[in-house]
Amino acid sequence: MVDRSVGTVARLLLALASASVLPAAAAPPRTMAEILAASRPEEWRRLDPDLTVRLELPQGVVLIELDPRFAPRHVDNLRVLIRARYFDGLAITRVQDNFVVQWGDPEAERPEGRRDLGAAEANLPPEFSVPWQAAWPFLRLPDGDGYAARVGFSRSLPVAQSRDRRTAWRIHCYGTVGVGRDTAPDSGNGAELYVVIGHAPRQLDRNVAVVGQVRHGIEHLSALPRGSGALGFFADPRQRIPIRRLVFERDLAPAERLPLEVLDSSSPSFAALIEARRNRRDAWYHQPAGHIDVCNVPLPVRRVDAE
Amino acid sequence: MVDRSVGTVARLLLALASASVLPAAAAPPRTMAEILAASRPEEWRRLDPDLTVRLELPQGVVLIELDPRFAPRHVDNLRVLIRARYFDGLAITRVQDNFVVQWGDPEAERPEGRRDLGAAEANLPPEFSVPWQAAWPFLRLPDGDGYAARVGFSRSLPVAQSRDRRTAWRIHCYGTVGVGRDTAPDSGNGAELYVVIGHAPRQLDRNVAVVGQVRHGIEHLSALPRGSGALGFFADPRQRIPIRRLVFERDLAPAERLPLEVLDSSSPSFAALIEARRNRRDAWYHQPAGHIDVCNVPLPVRRVDAE
């Protein structure tokens, strides 16, 4: 019962060197709820309405934060599509259990029936990884990862770096939003998007352009009925879920917006939260894990109080 | 784009030493579909009707395979409850997004209103890990794992071993079935069960008694509406999902049974499948992952053809 996993000594040394682990005498371990309750206002970052997309479904509202850093041309193209209201009236066409929800134009394969992309590009060069920029914040997770040399968080998003730190890419965790594509690497354009609703499909990392992360309302996607066709596509078109609209928060009246803020991954409270989840001290847990997977770190979001 | 993750050399050596990797000249890489299509009948193991539980919900049928090895007293107690039809008419009381679905007696906390446990024990000693038995099959996954010294598969279930191989426990992956309990380690009895419906909550490993794995119909659990109360409990009792019955396949008329078989994790096809998923060669993938997480290995199940 005291077996320890690979790399514990290295992790302990890293943990002792980090600001997130206080000496036992200084403060008792805290739960996530206690850490969030004690967090300071400046540790939270308000979502930018120019980068926050509202997906309206009959089931409810989903908010997605776009991050252009890891796929700049795809995010630019997606902006053009959203501003042209390309997605309004299209549909969720695929819900594959333990994998993804996907939406777009159900007629995309029929040249005569599909919706015009307007000013958006039909093909984009792949942006499956990008050069790391020194100005980007990075909180490294010392726990190690089987899929990448270095993993951690940047602007409250799970990200990976190459061993030489020169290349970076988004990690596919629950709620990650990517650009569907065909077999050709340049066949994606943003007109078809997917959201992860299962165990992290890390095999997708570095194989698609990742544009964002669900910050609110993912249960309106994850609880959808699964498609009965191959790959979870809906066998009957009537099962598709209509998209009322997909718009930027900026383009809504202020009263319509849902103002959110995320706990910044560079904040002391975020570092404390990782440790609180790595070794749970809640009375219920009798065996702390001593490890945390990058996709098991919560990314806290809260509603901004009325201003 | 050719960055490699930690331990690749070690993994390559292990992979070369394992029977699952054929020299490139001997056979081209195969996809999972090709491997399953080419599998031999004796590589599949029929589920034992004495250990297969049918959960009937309004949404459909869920089949759970119990494995007594990792929590023998809990499985015994659960057998007593199921045989007494304890669960029939009880309800799913909790659906927490990206975590678990849970069911039991909604009145369990009210001594005067709860259903009697009959001949079943109300408290059991914790069975959070067990001594490993030499007779148990084990296919080790060489990819490494942050939570346990050794991980792999036994009877098509994800399991972990201590470094000295003397102790073992079930790993919480998607579809894993465990016994809910209160804070005291001996407070579980099997009358409250949960199923994982999100990213593997490995922090539960070695903290609960794990009794089984969903083998069919998990979408009837994972697509349920999420509970709006704390921890995903249904705030309104009318939102609970009634359990029509929870019975052993053995206790059904043969025509009522749903005969299933699982690909045995000790079979050559299972080893080939792991490699096919570790490094996808499907045309769609341009960057093979070179690694696989224990909870990303599929556990194939198929219906037994009419006899």
Image (tube, coloured by chain):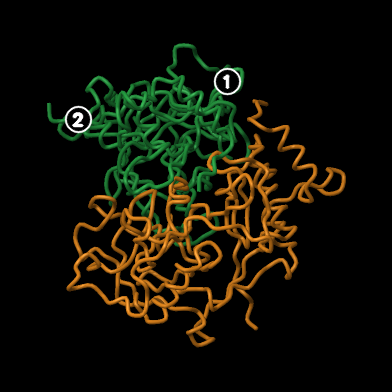
Chain colours: A orange, B green
Q: Tell me the element at label 1.
A: strand
Q: Which residue: 63% across, 41% down?
A: A284
What's the residue type where badge 2 is placed?
Val
Residue A83 in sight: yes
Q: As displayed, is residue A290 above or below residue B119?
A: below
Q: Earlier in the sequence, mark 2 or mark 1?
A: 1
The kind of residue on which mark 1 rests is Thr
Give left or right: position of B159 versus A267: left
- Label 2 marks a residue whose chain is B
Give the side of residue A307 with respect to residue B90, left or right: right
- Identify the residue at image location x=50%, y=14%: B133
Q: Residue at x 54, y 54 (%)?
A: A169
Q: Residues within 10 Å of mark 2 (few under 14, many from 20)?
A: some
Q: Is residue B122 above or below residue A20?
A: above
How far apart marks 2 and 1 lie (CA) works out to 34 Å
Pick the quarter of the image with the C terminus of chain A: bottom right
Instruction: Look at the image and tell me whether residue B237 can be seen.
Output: no
**Percent of width and height locating residue B191:** 45, 37
> Mark 1 and mark 2 in contact (Cβ < 8 Å)?
no
Chain letter of the residue beneath label 1 in the structure image: B
Q: Which residue is mark 2?
A: B304
- Residue under the point 37% across and 66% down: A189
Image location (x, y in percent) of residue A42: 73, 70
Q: Determine the secondary structure under disc 2.
A: loop
In x, y percent, where is residue B4? Answer: 54, 40
Looking at the image, which residue sits at the far front?
B25
The residue that label 1 is drawn on is B167
- The answer to which image quadrant residue A298 occupies is bottom right
Q: Along the horizontal axis of the image, is A200 left or right of A136? A: left
